[in-house]
Amino acid sequence: MTFQAYLDNIQTKTGMSAADFKKLAAKKGYLKDGVLKPEVKAGEIIKWLKEDFDLGHGHSMAIVAVLKGAKGDGC
């Protein structure tokens, strides 16, 4: 599965784009200058996405990659 396919599946499941998740992460204080703060661990993001959006590990890691600066879905 391609990176973009992961992002497409996430949007189908949640109704939210990668850009939407980036906005939410910023509101939660996970980002600085548009990217994931170094002190925020992937496990914290995965836990948030599993609890609030029922995303699995692989899909959560795709969002972590976006938060770290990977490009996809208009981000």
Image: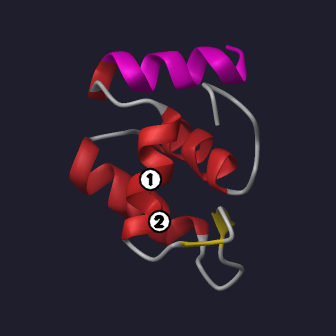
- Looking at numbered disc 1 in the image, what kind of residue is underneath it? Lys
Q: From the top left corner, tell me how far across and down residue 63 is, in percent.
A: 56, 44
- Looking at numbered disc 2 in the image, what kind of residue is underneath it? Ala
Look at the picture and state if 61 lies above or below 47.
Answer: above
Q: From mark 1 to mark 2, how far is it between C-alphas?
A: 5 Å
The question of residue 11 being in magenta is answered with yes
In the rendered image, which quarter is residue 5 located in?
top right
Give the labeled residue for mark 1. Answer: 23
Q: Residue at x 75, y 51 (%)?
A: 69
> SS for tag 1?
helix
Q: Residue at x 36, y 39 (%)?
A: 55
The question of residue 55 being in magenta is answered with no
Q: Residue at x 45, y 61 (%)?
A: 25
Residue placed furthest toward the bottom:
39
Side of 25 where 12 appears, left or right: left
Q: From the top left corner, tell me how far across and down residue 62 is, in percent.
A: 61, 39
Side of 74 where 13 appears, left or right: left
Q: Residue at x 57, y 23 (%)?
A: 6
Q: From the top left corner, tell me how far across and down residue 8 is, in percent.
A: 50, 16
- The reply to whether callout 1 and callout 2 are in contact (CB within 8 Å) is yes
Stretch in magenta: 1-12
Q: Quadrant of the N terminus?
A: top right
Look at the picture and state if 17 lies above or below 69.
Answer: above
Q: Main secondary structure of the magenta part?
A: helix
Look at the picture and state if 24 lies above or below 16.
Answer: below
Q: Residues within 10 Å of mark 1 (few under 14, many from 20)?
A: some
Give the labeled residue for mark 2. Answer: 26
